[in-house]
Image (cartoon, coloured by chain):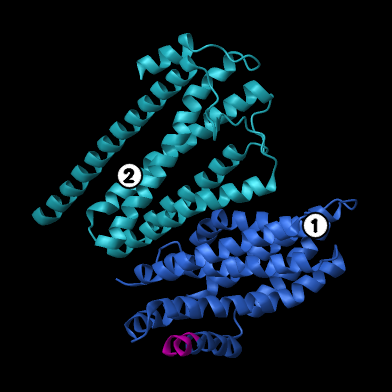
Chain colours: A blue, B cyan
Amino acid sequence: MSYVSDVTALASKDLKVELRARDTLPAMLLFVLSTLVVFRFALPSDTQDDAAYGLLWVAIVFAALLGLSRAWVPEQEHGVLDALVLAPCDRSAIWLGKTLATLLFLLAAQVVALPAFALFFAPLDATAIAGVLLADIGICVVGSLLAAMAAASRARELLLPLLVLPLSIPLVIGGVGAAVSADGERFLLFLALYDAVFAVLSWASFEYVVTE
Amino acid sequence: MGLAVLLALIVAPEDADQGISQRIFYIHVPIALTAYFCFGLGALKALLLLWRGDERYDLESYVAIHQGTIFGSLTLVTGALWAKASWGVWWTWDSNQLVLFLVLFLFYCAYFMLRFSLPEGARRARSSAVYALFGVVLIPVSFLAIRLAEDFIHPTVFTREGPQMSGSMFLTFVVSWSAVTLLAYVLYRVELTGKRIDRDLRELREVLS
């Protein structure tokens, strides 16, 4: 059970840092809300609901990117990552802890964003919300690994969206499909498949990305 | 290669409803298949790098992906030409294969960005390798996603019952495919040799200075 306690310790460390510094979450919240307002004016007034769902996904993906680009910054600034890699725990636990923490931030942002979307634009049904949840898992799973890669590079924040966006295209297809298609379950199944495949891949390969 | 061009232009019979434009099929499809093959090779070398830890595979994986990206861009270009000739538009979001190649093109461009912004060393090699592995998983996943999202309108030439082509068309296709694969292999060797010489020279210069 030490793996589980390692993961929870790492995730709760991130949550504590966030509670004290309040760097990421308010920024994500404000970003999602202002993006939705911008979209309201960017769309022609007679736009149908389906188009609005697409914009919700743009907002979600970019909010996630915002959270991910901050994910490894505390570790990088204070040299914590090297210490974590040296710590006597499985390295994939570092990845899992970071993924869980980022996922919690994203979910917290969406607790505000989804009702706001339903209020401003179009109603969301259970399938659409399930799609959002599954896609959140997918983007955090892939993103926390890629953010660790990007954090080691010269370009950092510039590089992360370039790395994550091509990989998030299937997620957006799945999420929009779950919201607008009559047969939403198929898209949910696809999203679950994506999450499973990339979770295994990221879990297995994280060690190679952080060790020297 | 010359034989392939000859066969594609003269010998193979014209398609009944697409006419002359159908001949680009003999270039477009082999290039696309070769691009997939290069991406697969790059991922295989990446896997070998992670597994065995031999530095040699880093350069091989990079060169294979570089070739794959070149052939992938060519696929986009020939695909756009074909789309213009047979559907009347340069680009259509209905063609799954083209959309998939666009996604892959973006993905592998990001691969180069990643590679060139990391400091050289074992960590760069491993990060690139991990990203290359993600790419080869992304291919079927995106394909599934794109197929879920849209109707399948590309003419399906290969079905479970074997290729739906006449004998001389199939022969032409096989010759073109082998020619393009051979071309890709030669380019791969040339670039690999060049990159190796480049690296050796740099090491030599460092030793001398």
- Mark 2 Cα within 10 Å, few/some/many (few <14, many 20+)? many
Q: In this view, does A105 lie to the left or right of A143?
A: right
Q: Residue B67's mark? A: none
Residue matched to label 1: A52
Element under disc 2: helix
* Numbered label tally: 2
- Quadrant into which the N terminus of chain A falls: bottom left
In the image shown, does B125 or B32 lie closer to the viewer?
B32
Q: Residue at x 81, y 66 (%)?
A: A124
Magenta span includes A6? yes
Q: In this view, does B205 lie above or below B11?
A: below
Q: What residue type is labelled 2?
A: Val
Residue A163 in percent (x, y) is at: 50, 58
Q: What residue span does the magenta drawing correspond to?
A: A1-7
Q: Nearer the viewer, residue A101 or B153?
A: B153
Q: Which chain carries label 1?
A: A
Can residue A197 be seen? yes
Tag 1: residue type?
Ala
Which residue of the protein is positioned furthest toward the front in this rendering?
A: B161
Q: What residue did someone put label 2 on?
A: B63
